[in-house]
Image (cartoon, rainbow, N blue to C red):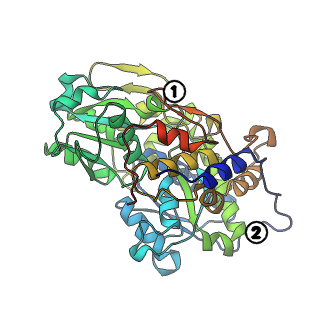
Amino acid sequence: MSVTRRSTLAAASLLAAAPRGIFAQGSTTPEVRKATLGYIALTDAAPLIVAKEKGLFAKYGMPDVEVAKQASWGATRDNLVLGGGAGGIDGAHLLTPMAYLIHTGRIVQNNTPVPMALLARLNTNGQAISVAEKHKALGARLDASPLRRVFTPESKVAMTFRGGTHDLWIRYWMAAAGIDPDRDVSTIVVPPPQMVANMRVGTMDAFCVGEPWNAQLINQRLGYSALITGELWKDHPEKCFALRADFVERNPNATRAMLAAVIEAAQWCDVAANQPELAAILGRRAWFNVPPADILPRMQGIVDFGDGRTITNTDLTMKFWRDHASYPFMSHDLWFLTEDIRWGVLPPDTDTAALVQQVNKEAIWREAAARAGVAQGDMPRGTSRGRETFFDGKVFDPENPQAYLQSQSIKRMGGA
């Protein structure tokens, strides 16, 4: 079973295309003043939170935008399905693959699709894979193979949502070391803010999550970070900003207004001098309710792994704007879909190219970026970032996803 030839050829065609979209003419006045956006307590939600805190939504004509905390990614999905008009949410800080899994109905009750529009990436890098203190002496780091000695089918390895980014990072890490994530361990779902508490009770062996929860685990001496995900794939895509497609269709100006605010906020978040203030904002009770000391160091690129290693490398840690972090490369969405095929979340005959065309709204990003004052020359020239190389030497060529899938020795490609 494999990605269809039709899908592969279409992917090559779409990723070679020049940037699309003509800037909107006429009035830019938003059709509505309010939208409700969900977020999870993770550092990469910062652009949405800053856009609210710094009055940027209001600056672009959307003063009543609400940024509402969600209990889990499952709750985020359920509230997106409801929609803002029915007491749910209009859009969210979202695991990138979730936009596609909701759009196709794969994770929705009765498999009923809810069309989605992916408007921006919120960040690259900035996640980690952490291991329980009881396994520290084994020395598993980027190479997970030392854990093969202690992992059993009863070992609990946690991620935040099936088919989401954290699921894919920890699966990639284990599989690269010959550990089958579906047979050699028990992979479980735990909401991000509950990761540390679950590790504390001693029943979990490892987890993958965003910050500040890996840093908090170390500060509470409950484990260590085997790796930060920028080591697994440098400048990898992570969360996205997505809206229900019907909101975008009804409110194109409001969509661009909110997106311009989020883009301006991403730029603010990536200014080093702003990061102490950013950590203080995120740490407030109203947002994360955690000490800023759990947030700031890793945001600044200062990583204490908790096993004696420390690094200072801002190029491997979270980026909100630098190096086109905000732009939603179509090639990255294609990788997420390919990995979800690899692990049986999506069927092997999924027309990935068609899906990317339906969901990814990079042309709207370009229009909103222009409105936020981004020069044309500072935007990516195309929709693909090209070939991507992973820590184990595997290469994803967006013009040939099939070859990438064939190169993976551990996979599960039989449908969800």
What kind of residue is marked 2? Thr
* Quarter of the rendering containing residue 155: top left
Q: Is residue 310 visible?
A: yes
What kind of residue is marked 1? Thr
Q: Vertical placement of 386 versus 289: above or below?
A: above
Q: Is residue 185 left or right of residue 143?
A: left
Q: Quadrant of the C terminus?
A: bottom left
Q: Is residue 333 left or right of residue 186?
A: right
On residue 4, which mark appears?
none
Residue depicted at 79% across the width and 42% down the height:
375
Tell me residue 186's x, y (percent).
22, 48
Residue on which disc 1 sits: 314
Asked which secondary structure carries label 2, the reply is loop
Q: Vertical placement of 381 versus 4: above or below?
A: above
Residue depicted at 18% across the width and 36% down the height:
151
Say which of 393 and 99 sits in front.
393
Q: Is residue 224 left or right of residue 265?
A: left
Q: Vertical placement of 61 versus 240: above or below?
A: below
Tell me residue 414's x, y (percent).
39, 56
Asked which secondary structure carries label 1, the reply is loop
Q: Is residue 122 visible?
A: no
Residue depicted at 72% across the width and 40% down the height:
380
Distance of label 1 from label 2 (alpha carbons): 38 Å
Tell me residue 105's x, y (percent).
47, 69
Could you classify mark 2 by the number of other residues whose Cα lies within 10 Å: few (under 14), some (14-19), or many (20 or more)?
A: some
- Contact check, label 1 and label 2, Cβ < 8 Å: no
Residue on which disc 2 sits: 29
Could you classify mark 1 by the number of other residues whose Cα lies within 10 Å: few (under 14), some (14-19), or many (20 or more)?
A: some
Q: Vertical placement of 30 versus 411: above or below?
A: below
Say which of 395 and 92 sits in front.
395
